[in-house]
Amino acid sequence: GEDVEQSLFLSVREGDSSVINCTYTDSSSTYLYWYKQEPGAGLQLLTYIFSNMDMKQDQRLTVLLNKKDKHLSLRIADTQTGDSAIYFCAEITGGSYIPTFGRGTSLIVHP
Amino acid sequence: EAGVTQFPSHSVIEKGQTVTLRCDPISGHDNLYWYRRVMGKEIKFLLHFVKESKQDESGMPNNRFLAERTGGTYSTLKVQPAELEDSGVYFCASSRQGPTGELFFGEGSRLTVL
């Protein structure tokens, strides 16, 4: 199976909250990232969390990490049409030091 | 500051032909990475340069793929001969402080092998 798993699609209404989930397999993950890819653009780092943290908040973004379940989530409050993009979860483990990416979740925001 | 640029943005070739993809990293970034995304699948790591040296090439699929970074500036990724399964989007990324820092990605080069 994949090292980092994400669901492929999420559709939300403008103004609602979005929650994008990610599960990973390696318990030695040290850094976990969320990257965003807008149409026609490269991936951009959105936020990250160290493995010794449970939560990180940055304006409309909240990252939650459950190390026991190897589950990472990204919550976007008051989702806007400009948030429509593909969101990639990525991890770095103690052994590799190279980010491993998931397949991305396409967030579709409709009015 | 210019971002990571990749060329070409899209290439369509026939099976058995050769294609060379180019990546210009952000100036001053010693670390350069190549990744590939096959449609609908995860972004898979191919290799990592530190300056002109290959630090990790464990993700290179086979010897039809050759990556170079002469002089530690731009990098090329050559596929010769191309096969159908090589189709996908090839992303280049660069970073200043190594893999644990932020990676800056190019827009990708879409390769279609017919």
Image: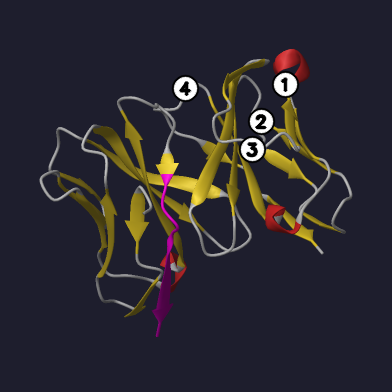
Q: Which residue is mark 4?
A: B98
Mark 2 → mark 4, Cα distance in angstroms: 13 Å
Quadrant of residue A107 within the rendered picture: bottom left
**Callout 3 crowding tier (Cα within 10 Å): few <14, some 14–19, many ≥20:** some
- The image's mark for residue B110 is none
Q: Magenta span covers which residues?
A: A101-111
Q: Considering only order in the chain, which callout, 3 or 4, is on the residue closer to the N terminus?
A: 3
As drawn, B74 above or below B109:
above
Q: How is the image coloured?
A: secondary structure
Residue topped by disc 2: B25
How far apart marks 1 and 3 lie (CA) works out to: 14 Å
Question: Mark 2 or mark 4: which comes first in sequence?
Answer: 2
User: Residue at image x 41%, y 69%?
Assistant: A8
Kind of residue sitting beneath label 3: Gly
Question: Which of the numbered marks, if any, corresponds to residue B3?
Answer: 3
The reply to whether the C-beta atoms of the residues labelled 4 and 1 are less than 8 Å apart is no
Say the numbered circle drawn on residue B73.
1
Q: Residues within 10 Å of mark 4 (few under 14, many from 20)?
A: some
Q: Residue under mark 3: which chain is it in?
A: B
Residue B57 at x, y = what percent?
58, 27
Q: CA distance from mark 2 to mark 3?
A: 7 Å
Mark 2 in CB contact with mark 3 (< 8 angstroms): no
In the image, what residue occupies the spot 45% across and 54% down?
A36
Q: Could you tell me which secondary element the residue under label 1 belongs to?
A: loop
Residue B25 shown left or right of residue A44 in the figure: right
Type of amino acid at the residue the image marks with label 4? Gly
Q: Secondary structure at mark 2?
A: loop
Instruction: Have a look at marks 2 and 1 and say if they share a chain.
Output: yes
Q: Nearer the viewer, mark 4 or mark 3?
A: 4
Residue B68 coordinates in the image, percent (x, y)? 74, 25
